[in-house]
Image (tube, rainbow, N blue to C red):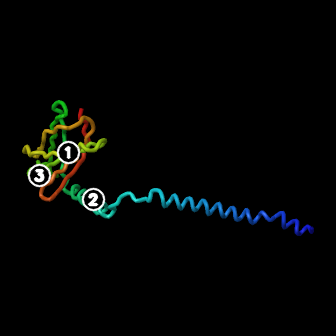
Amino acid sequence: MTSDAAGRRGSGWIPWVFAGAFGLVVAANGALVYLATSTFNGLVTENAYQEGVAFNRMLERADDQARTAWSVEPSFSAKGGMTGELTLVVATRDGAPLTGAVATVRFVRPIQEGYDFDASLASRGDGRYGATVTFPLPGLWDAHVTIERDGRVHGLVRRLVVR
């Protein structure tokens, strides 16, 4: 055997190292492709277009609310048990009482579903609106207040603790 043939025979494993390395890269890429297609697809919502349109409407309402500049002072006083009095004092930009509006509140329990409820606030004159509210459970509640008059809508959210 010549030294040239012995040198070739000793280095015959080198192409297999390259083939093995490429095989390892192909296997890793295959595993990543499988994981990418079989796990979370990145879709957060099924109705992205409708939610986008609703978001634009919300931005328009926020601009309208900033232009009207109504001031709303909510207060809640417990009457005993899980009953209390919710009162809103609403004024226009120049401080005059806002009368003739329709005020509603959606009470949302942020930590538990199934107990949300609505309440309408009656006008009590001089820009004051109120209602007696009985909560089904004690704890945290978010009051989503909406005041409407002449096509204008003003909204705010306040957190309440019912003991």
Dot 2 alpha-carbon crowd within 10 angstroms: few under 14, some 14 to 19, many 20 or more:
few
Number of marks present in the image shown: 3
Per the model, the C-alpha gap separating discs 1 and 2 is 25 Å
Seen in the image, is 122 located left or right of residue 1? Answer: left
Tell me the element at label 1: strand
Residue at left 18%, top 31%?
Answer: 81
Q: Name the residue that disc number 3 marks.
A: 101
Q: Residue furthest top?
A: 80
Specify the amino acid type for callout 1: Phe
Q: Closer to the camera: disc 1 or disc 3?
A: 1
Q: Name the residue that disc number 2 marks.
A: 59
Q: Where is residue 143 in the image (x, y as percent from the top left)?
A: 22, 44
Residue at left 40%, top 59%?
Answer: 43
Specify the amino acid type for callout 2: Leu
59 above or below 97?
below
Q: Name the residue that disc number 1 marks.
A: 117
Q: Are marks 1 and 2 in contact (CB under 8 Å)?
A: no
Specify the amino acid type for callout 3: Ala
Seen in the image, is 149 located left or right of residue 8? Answer: left
Work out whether residue 71 or residue 105 is closer to the camera in this orientation and state it: 105
Seen in the image, is 108 located left or right of residue 128? Answer: right
Tell me the element at label 2: helix
58 above or below 105?
below
- Which quarter shows the N terminus? bottom right
Q: Where is residue 45 in the image (x, y as percent from the top left)?
A: 35, 58
Per the model, the C-alpha gap separating discs 3 and 2 is 22 Å
Q: Position of residue 11 (x, y in %)?
A: 81, 64
Residue 136, labelled with which disc? none
